[in-house]
Amino acid sequence: MAVYLYNNEEIKKIAQSCQITANILDEIELIIDEGITTKDIDSEARKLCSKYGVKPAFLGYQGYPAAICTSINEVVVHGIPAKRKLLNGDIVGIDFGVYSEGYYGDSARTYIIGKVDDKIKQLVEVTKTSLYKGIKKAVAGNRISDISNEIEEYVKQFGFVPVRNFTGHGIGENLHEEPSVPNYGKPGKGPRIQDGMVFAIEPMINTGTYKVDVLADDWTAVTKDGGFSAHFEHTIAIIDGKAEILTKGKNFC
Ligand code: MF3
Ligand code: CO
């Protein structure tokens, strides 16, 4: 499968969806606190989508039942909002995307609730840094797995492990397109990076095993050993040979 190359006009429209995604995440961020349920956060996301006149990208996608994914502690990704309250000592990944005027945006951030162990704080920081390390490798001439390798090598130094079952992905006219962007692996493999590519890089990093189980709801992915997992995601476009981050927010840029 070929990787679609977007022209400047198309990238502008993708960038608009991405900016709205970031703006809504910025607003969601304001209510994330101890005591709030993940369902309340989902309601807020839905309200904000109406306010901005956009469609939540995940709602109904392959039957997904909510506007956001809320992944707490050992949940890696695709946690479904529920009555569970955020508690002191939790980490929560908020994954969100919009569909607007024919194009998608996608981004995720992990938040620390109250006080967590130093190791968990480090997991969150290292995961975020690994995203930016990966983005730096997203330059024309490199190959996709140069990003993957950079993320794995960086997190490994701290004893952390990238998830293998889920990857970053091309995005634009569809939420998920070619290329797949793994968070581990040898360098020098996969499509060559070039102008017009638009894709989401999304390291999901675990404290213990990389292995995951999917719960009976068919969505919630949890670490097999119960270790914590963190997740950050930006959508980027390759312009003039370099990565432009399209989902920059106030505190996530
Ligand atoms: N950012 C996630 C991904 O790219 C969110 C998808 S949730 C889903 O896989 F419900 F849309 F699948
Ligand atoms: Co994604």
Image (cartoon, rainbow, N blue to C red):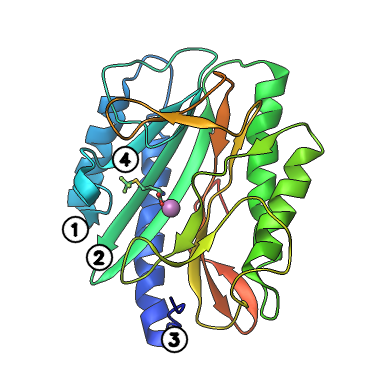
Image coordinates for residue 170, horizontal then vertical, percent? 45, 66
| Above/below status of 182 relative to 117 | below
Residue at 35% from the left image edge and 58% from the top image edge? 20
Residue at 41% from the left image edge and 18% from the top image edge? 86
Q: Amino acid at mark 4?
A: Ile
- Label 3: which residue? 8
Picture disc at residue 68: 4
Asked if the residue at tag 2 contacts the one at tag 1, i.e. Cβ–Cβ closer than 8 Å, the answer is yes
Image coordinates for residue 124, horizontal then vertical, percent? 63, 33
Foreground pick, 205 / 55: 205
Asked if the residue at tag 4 contacts the one at tag 1, i.e. Cβ–Cβ closer than 8 Å, the answer is no
Q: Amino acid at mark 3?
A: Asn
Residue 34 makes an appearance in the image? yes
Residue 247 makes an appearance in the image? no
In what element is the residue under mark 1? loop
Count residues near mark 3 (Cα–Cα under 10 Å), then give few for <14, some for 14-19, many for 20+: few
| Above/below status of 184 relative to 162 | below
Viewer-side label of 1, 2 = 2
Q: Amino acid at mark 2?
A: Ser
- Label 1: which residue? 53
The quadrant in which residue 121 appears is top right
Disc nearer the start of the sequence (1/2):
1
Disc nearer the start of the sequence (3/1):
3
The quadrant in which residue 94 appears is top left
Give the Cα distance between marks 3 and 2: 17 Å
- Label 2: which residue? 100
Residue at 24% from the left image edge and 72% from the top image edge? 102
The quadrant in which residue 162 appears is top right
Residue at 54% from the left image edge and 44% from the top image edge? 232
In what element is the residue under mark 3? helix
Q: Across the whole image, how many numbered discs are drawn on residues?
A: 4
